[in-house]
Image (cartoon, rainbow, N blue to C red):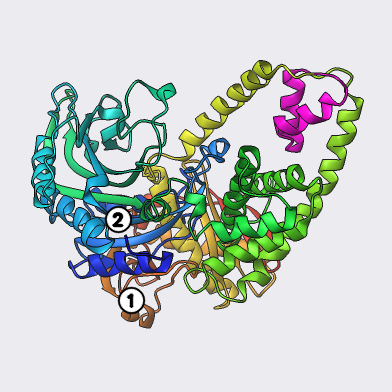
Amino acid sequence: MPKITYKDLRQAFSKFWEERGHKEVPPIPLVPKDDPTTLFTGSGMQQLVPYLLGEPHPLGKRLYNIQRCFRSQDIEEIGDNRHTTFFEMMGNWSLGDYFKKEQLNWFFEFLVEVLGFNPEKLYVTVFKGYKDLPADEESIEIWKEIFKKYGIKAEVGERIFKYPAEKNWWSRAGVPENMPPGEPGGPDSEVFYLFEKVNHDPAFGPYCHPNCDCGRFLEIGNSVFMQYKKLEDGSFSLLPSKNVDFGGGLERILAALQDDPDVFKTEVYLPIIKRVEELVGREYKEEAVKRNLRIIADHIKAAVFLIKDGVLPSNKEQGYVLRRLLRRVAVKVYQLSSQVDSEILLKAAQEVVEIYKGVYFGDKDREKILPVISDEVKRFKSTLKRGMRVIEKIDEIDGKKAFDLYQSYGFPLEIVKEIFEEKGQKINEEEFRAEFEKHKAISRKGAEKKFKGGLADRSEQTIKYHTATHLIHQALFDVLGDGVRQEGSNITAERLRFDFYSPVKVEENHIREVERIVNEKIKEGLPVYFKIMPKEEAHKIGAKAFFKEKYPEKVKVYFIGDYSKEFCGGPHVKNTREVGKIHIFKLKRIGANLYRLYAK
C-alpha cells in the first residue's frame, strides 16, 4: 500500500468528491453557534441537519466537508488504541440526489482505487431489519456486485454481516421504537478494515466479526440512508426525497492505511508522543506508560483546538471540559515524571500546532494558545498541593474517599492507590467503581440533554429567540457603532444569551436603548425571509457574518424587513410580531471589551 500522508488524505478526499459534482461545506467551530442542545460540534452532519430534513442548501444537493469534532461523552475511555476525544470527520452528502448504488460504489472506489486498500481486507455491515422494517437487501446486492468486480465472492455472514438497529440504523432518537411520529431515519452500511496481524481475543466472544471489540476490525466509514419516516400509528413510510449522510474518521483511515490498529502511531499523534517520551524519560512500550501517553496526546490536542476556537478554562460547560482535559494531562505527566511541569505540556502543545500547521494553525496561534495552558497548569499546581494535604489527613482510605479525591482534585485511582500503599492501605476498588459509575450515569444524563444527534432545539420559543438575536445584533450596531462584533450566542427555551465585542464601554443606558429598538421593530411586524446569494454579494449589501465561521461561496441570508441582514441557516419566525416583547435582564463583562447579555 502506498504511503499516504495526513495532508495527502485530506486532498484526495476533497478531489474525489469535487470530481463527482460535490461542493465543499466549510467546517464550523468546535463550539457551534446558536445550538443549546450540544456543547461541542460532534459530527460533520451537525450543521447539515436542517438540510437533511428538507431545507434547500445554498450549495445544492451534493456536498462534502472535513469537520473537526470533539466528543466528551466517553472521555474516560481514552487510553486504548482507537478512542479519541478530538478527531476529524470526512463526510459527503446527497440531498435527494443519488442514493445507495452510487454512494457504496463511490466510497469503495475511493478506498481501493484512490487510497490503495486491499479489497480482501475490507468487510461491510448492513441493517438486518426490525419488525415491519425490512432488512437492507438492496445494499446487500450492491455490495455483492462491488466485491465481484474485484474477484471476491461476498456472502452474508462471511464478507457481508447483518446487524440489528442498535448497530446499523440511524435517527436522531436512536432505534426505530424510540422515534417520535414524523421523525426521519434509515439503515446504514459500514465498512471495516481487518488487521490480520491482530489475534482474536476469546474474551470478546467465541468468534470474531466486524463489530467485535477485540481490535481485529476497525470501522472506517459509515453511509446512512435516510429513507423512512415514522407515522402516527408507529409504522413507517418511505420519504419522497431520500438522503445520503456519510462519515469516515480521518485518523482511523490513516491507521488502516498503515495496517496498524493504533491510531496513536499515525503522524497526527506520534510526534506528540515522541516529544513527551523525551521530556519524561519514558517509552511508548510498557502498557501503563502507553495508556498515559495516549491520554496526554489526545487531551493536549483537544485542548489546543478548543482554545483555538475560543474556549477558556472555567467551571462551566465548555470551559469545564477544557479545564478537565488540561488537569488530567497534568496528572498523567505527574505519574510519568513525578512533577507537574508546564513546560512539558507547552512543548506537547507546540507539536500539535506544528502537525496541523497550514491546515488549522498559523504561527501566531501559539501566542494565543500557550499562555492559556501555562496559566491553567500553574493554578492546578496549587490544587495538587491542597489535595496532597487532604490525603495526609486521611487516616483510612475507602472507595468513596478515593472517588472524592478524583472528583475534587483530579487524582486518578492509580495515584491514590500508590500514595496509600505507602501507608500499608488498600483501596476497595469496587466501591470506587460504584461511585464512579453513579457519577457517570448522572453525567451521561446531562450529556444526553446536551446532545440530540447534533440537532439544535427547534421549539417555537427558541425560534423566536433566534430571530431576536438578529434584532439585538443590529440594535447593538445602531447604539454602539460599527466596531461591534458578535462573539457567540446560546439559546434555550427559557432565555437567549448573546456575546459581543465592543470598543465602546457598554453602559446600562446603552442596553436600555438596544432593548427599546428591538421591541420597536417587533411591534412593526417586519417580514422575516431569506435569500440564497453569492457570498461576495451578501458582503456588498452589508449582511452581517459571524467572524469565527467560514462560509461557502453561496450563502443563505436572512432579512428582517429592511432593518437587519445576516448570514444564517435559520430557522426563524415569519414576522417579528411573533417574537413578543424582549427584556434584556442581565449584562456582564466577560473579558477585555467583551460582553455578555441575557434576554427573555
Position of residue 222 measured from the top left corner of the image (x, y, whole percent): 28, 45
Mark 1 neighbour density, 10 Å: few (under 14) some (14–19) many (20 or more): some
Q: Main secondary structure of the magenta part?
A: helix
How many neighbours does mark 2 have within 10 angstroms: few (below 14), some (14-19), or many (20 or more)? some
Where does the image place residue 331, in percent across and percent down from the top left? 73, 43
Residue 412 part of the magenta-drawn span = yes
Horizontally, is 293 left or right of 568 in the view?
Answer: right
Residue 149 at what x, y percent from top left?
Answer: 9, 52
* Amino acid type indicated by mark 2: Lys
Q: Which mark is residue 535?
A: 1
Which range is magenta?
398-425
Q: Amino acid at mark 1?
A: Lys
> Is residue 52 visible from the viewing direction of this image?
yes
Mark 1–mark 2 Cα distance, whole angstroms, equals 23 Å
- In the image, taking residue 251 as reference, residue 600 lies left or right, namely right
Report the residue marked by disc 2: 574
Is the N terminus in the top left, top right, bottom left or bottom right quadrant?
Answer: bottom left
At 68% from the left and 48% from the top, the residue drawn is 329
